Amino acid sequence: MASKPLKPLYWTDAHFCGLRAQTNVYGLTKITSKEGLTKLLAASINGHFVSVEYQKSSNRLIPITREDVFFSSGPHSGPAGGTEVFEIVSVDVICNSDGKERIILAITYLLLASHFEQKSPSPHMNIYFLPEKEPDGPYLNIIDAVPLSQVQSLNLDFIPFKLMHFPIYKDDGSKEMCFLLGGGDHKVHVYRQSAESESFYEEQEAVDKFFPEFAKIDGGVTQMELMQVNDEERLTALGLQTGLVSLTHVNIKTKEILKRWTTELDSPITSLQLFTLSTRAPCPEFLDKQDLAIPDEKEEEPEAINLLVTSAIDPSVVFWDVVCCGLSQVHHLPYSNSQDVVLCSCVIDIDFDGENEILIGTYGQVLLAYKFVQYQPHSMLMTSTPFQSPMPIGIKHTPTPPSDSEKPVRGDSSFDQCDNRRRHKSMATALDSSDGMSKLDRHDRHKSDEVSALLDASLVKDHQMARLVRSQENLASPRSVYFATPDHLVSSELSLPSGNLPELTEYPCYRLKWTKRFSDPVMGLTCDDVMGDGMLDLVVLTLKGLHIMQPDLNEVSQLVLERLRLVVDPGSEADDDYHRLQTETLDQAN
Amino acid sequence: MSFALEGGSVKCTKIAMGSDMNNTIMRTVSFVERIEVEYHGNIITQAMVLADVDNDMANELVVGNIEGHIAIFKGDSSKAWKKTTVSGMLTCLAVGEIHTPHKNSLVCITAEGWCYVYDITPQSPFQNLSGDDSDESRMFRPVFTQELPANARVMCLADIDSDGHVEMVIGYSDRVVRAFRWHVPHDPESGHFVPLQKWQLAGQIGSITINYDKEHRPELMVSQPGATFVSLQVRPQFRHIKSESHLDKLSGSRASSSLEHSGSFGASAAGDSLKASGKQQTQGAQSNGNKSDPLSSKTEPASSSGLSKVSAKSSESLSSANTLSSESKSRLDTSNQESVSKSKSESPKDGHNDSSSVKVSMRQRGDKVNIQPHISDCPFDSGESQLEKSQGRLSQFLDSSFDEDGYLIYHPLANSQIRNKDTSTVIIGGINRGRTSHSSTDSDPPQSQATYYALATLDGSLNLVENDTILWSLHVDHYLFTLSKLDVTGNGKEEVVCCSWSGQTYIVNHSKETVRYDFPDSVAAFCAGYYSVRDHVNVPCFVYATFNNRICIYPNISLPRVESTNLMKVMGRKKETKELLHKLNVNADDMESVQKLYHWCLYGQHRKS
């Protein structure tokens, strides 16, 4: 839990690498090596792969970016050996950490009709068994290792979608990693590795044996998310092309379905996340042993598990505490459908207060970050500023009611309108005034009068806040993203059609906390410690490139120091500021 | 399998040594926010400037193209705020306090030699930025026009002689650099540019810049092919003439002698072209005066033609003019042009000088009575080439007497031997080093640091130099054609920003850490600087002019830091970290434990306060 209210942190590019062709929503995967290093692998649909990893060299941290086209060199000039036209669908990597390190890369792709008679694309899956790293052998980058690996090619008789891996628990208690592949044939296919030949085979019975929840599915499986609740139970969420979401509570041991919930949205499910609200990180053992002021780890009472569902055009929803309440407790993410199709999501604590935020990537080139707010906040900060103004203005005190003092400002319509035209229409500004809203209304199909009244009321409340934010906000100007868009188009394009508005006055709820623009649609989101510093980095895959993002490290380091100080000396908090001043003077003296 | 592994390792090394090495390990960022404006025509890099042209404390973007259209962009409007058209091919644009102290003016030079000075009035509060006011109100007109020598290529407005006045230094495609100063003889209406000094260079001029030495004295630097540069020595006399009235008196009362001198320019230029002489003979010609020069008559027709040209012009552009002085000046111009053309025909001789250090001294007439604004003539005398260490010679020069003036100092940088000697080079000087680094002694006050300068070549090498010592050298696989400096991180140290034709932009800090941005288009012109998008706040930005009629302004390019770094490194730089880690019995070198600790700090359960 946070020791102090935290300033929002601003995440900026730590590294970026471009892709030569566009990618898709299944194009990002990560590889975690035995040493705990995380590498990222992104694939464009034409077979161009990019890998990024960080290496430490002579006290410098170097991002190693490698790119190659796996299929066009070596013995396999095409994925199937020929020069076919193909399109990569999904990528996944299994890193076996038990005993020897073995990396297995699986790629599903469609061979497009290159021959006359072959009308429909023929789907395939290639599985690459990357060579093991020899103890004293040279370090092999994954890009170099793939051409040297053994390949297993499988013909698929269905259109592949999401490819992922999940362990199955065999009756003898051992774990076995297998590939799960969502198919357009209304099935989830399970690929198991044979013990003798190491190759993978599809096992129909595995569905009955290990995944009873995959038994009856009524649509193409675009997304799936599995989570081990405890040793005996598992939650499985499946998202279908039809917009159907099913959540199954399964007992692993007895292989029986404890409970099943379904709900239906109007558009294909684009992502699912099972998560808990608070972040959990175990206290390192070396601290446990010492007599330090470490807060007692609370009895690991299982925390409520929530399910985030994003679909293409509906607002994203979070189902709260699904184990207890099923899909009954709903929280909407406001404005989540305002920036074109939602393509991906990620759960990460971006402000280090111990609570996870929800990040959503949209085709509208925007990343939206939502924070769960328990109570009506004194001030709500929304800004798209990544770095330009690291110190956002917050209203520390009570929210200013729409007072008379505000009216002259708003009444000055000529100025305001001119201002409207010039200002940057980002999330914050679009919320800024009712002038903006009237513009939005025109483009809003669903909006009812009550909702608009409700929104207006809340906007008035937030009015002053938004105004302040606007002055701080950076230049996410429409033209900066939409090339040569005429002004009238811009206003509609960036506006916030308020499809299914949540009741903003009801707390707790999710509130939009931070937005960031990208130069291309956001296709994939994940987080991992790519840099090896204990902090999770945000990985954003856009249509044309891969971003690794970092918050302002100076602020994070301040925060870590503060918390370390508390651990070392619990009584130090009173003269905390004094201490900081002291260190600052020390730093300056250097 | 083992065989295959070997193959892999071979491939590894090959790639590591290959040309894409830099891109493989270089940090890259992507900038998103941008303002696109439409602007047609080919833009030369020198004709794109970010500066406060209307003196409202907010910077604008001024662009000129080779058709002579000038446009000023302000704020985030995609339409030009103001525009105008000059006749001729616009090659240089600059903004500076050229004719009114503390007031910026826009100076435009066309290839034909016409110099236009504009005073832009700030936007009135009633004027709508993107509004629909007529084109008429968007036009602006020059306040002053003057014909200067043709073929201007690069320009730099700076106080080159520390006299508190901004001089205009123009580099020409005929390898000449001339310095001009705004001069107001009597009547404030009759101000005009008077030539100060002229330097003849051996190689094509890439760019002109100003660098500052330890005492903050300006040094005028001109880049030369092959990653070398020449520093131009400003005549000491002009450092000493501070008073305008003195100048006035001289140019006014000595008008006739100035005429004579204009003759003598041609004469001594001709003498130069004869080139039979050494220093002695030139001196002799000078001391004897013009009349004794047999060639002075030769220049007469040119001078008189110049006279007629200027009187026509002065009636047109200057309401009341000190005709005599402008006439004499124009004569100077004309005769000077002649001398240029002559020396041009002569110049190939000095094109390739293999001596490691060549200093060319330029003799000036040492007649102190006749000190006045004029184009100094610079006989290019190879006989005087001295194989001396340029630095040694520099100190000698500084100590030497008055009449030893007008020098070029050639700086062959240490590793210039390995490079193509003809590759075109650009230079940027005055790169701010920020606070005194801890390596230097504490006794140095921060202001006594010489600024860095950087050179970039078209074949892809980038060097940061301090006082002829290359601090680092970076080689990339792209054609680097333009060079800027900008404090991207906001730490007071200016980074070197270099852009290639293909759009690769390298931001390099003083310790050679590099971050790259790939602009997704071919670049016709690039500049880095400060621009105000709104609220009169100048933010660092990059401006790219493309070949398809668009200019992209990236107003949000600030980065927290140039190098790749992680939390561990940032924490490691703090003193307190070590103490705290020590108290926690965590070995600071044990990366894994520290990593776990930080992870727990950020995401673990913490005491509520």
Image: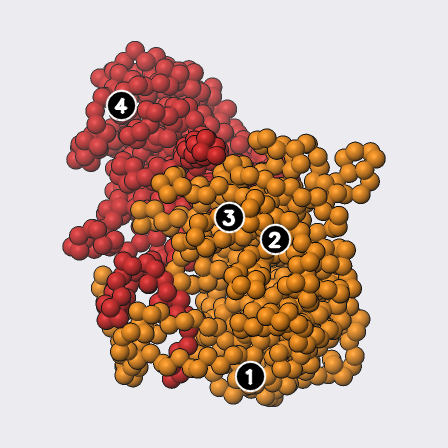
- Near mark 2 (Cα within 10 A), the count class, few <14, some 14-19 or many ≥20, is many
- Asked which quadrant contains residue A72, the reply is top right
Q: How is the image coloured?
A: by chain
Q: Earlier in the sequence, mark 1 or mark 2?
A: 2
Tag 4 residue: B356
- Near mark 4 (Cα within 10 A), the count class, few <14, some 14-19 or many ≥20, is some
Q: Is residue A491 above or below residue A447?
A: above
SS for dot 2: strand
Tag 2 residue: A192
Q: In the displayed image of the protein, which residue is found farthest to the front? A: A172
Q: Residue B437: horizontal and vertical position, in percent?
A: 25, 53
Cα distance, mark 3 to mark 1? Answer: 43 Å
Identify by letter the chain in red: B
- Work out whether residue B455 can be spotted: yes
Cα distance, mark 1 to mark 4? Answer: 74 Å
Q: Quadrant of the image for the N terminus of chain A?
A: bottom left
The amino acid pointed to by label 4 is Ser
Q: Residue B125: horizontal and vertical position, in percent?
A: 59, 66
Q: Are marks 4 and 3 in contact (CB under 8 Å)?
A: no
The amino acid pointed to by label 1 is Gln
In the rendering, which numbered label is found on residue A374?
1
* Mark closer to the observer (3, 1): 3
In the rendering, which numbered label is found on residue A103?
3
Asked whether B404 or A492 is in front, the reply is: A492
Q: Quadrant of the image for the C terminus of chain A?
A: bottom left
In the rendering, which numbered label is found on residue B27?
none
Q: Is residue A261 above or below residue B244?
A: below
Identify by letter the chain in orange: A
Cα distance, mark 1 to mark 2? Answer: 44 Å
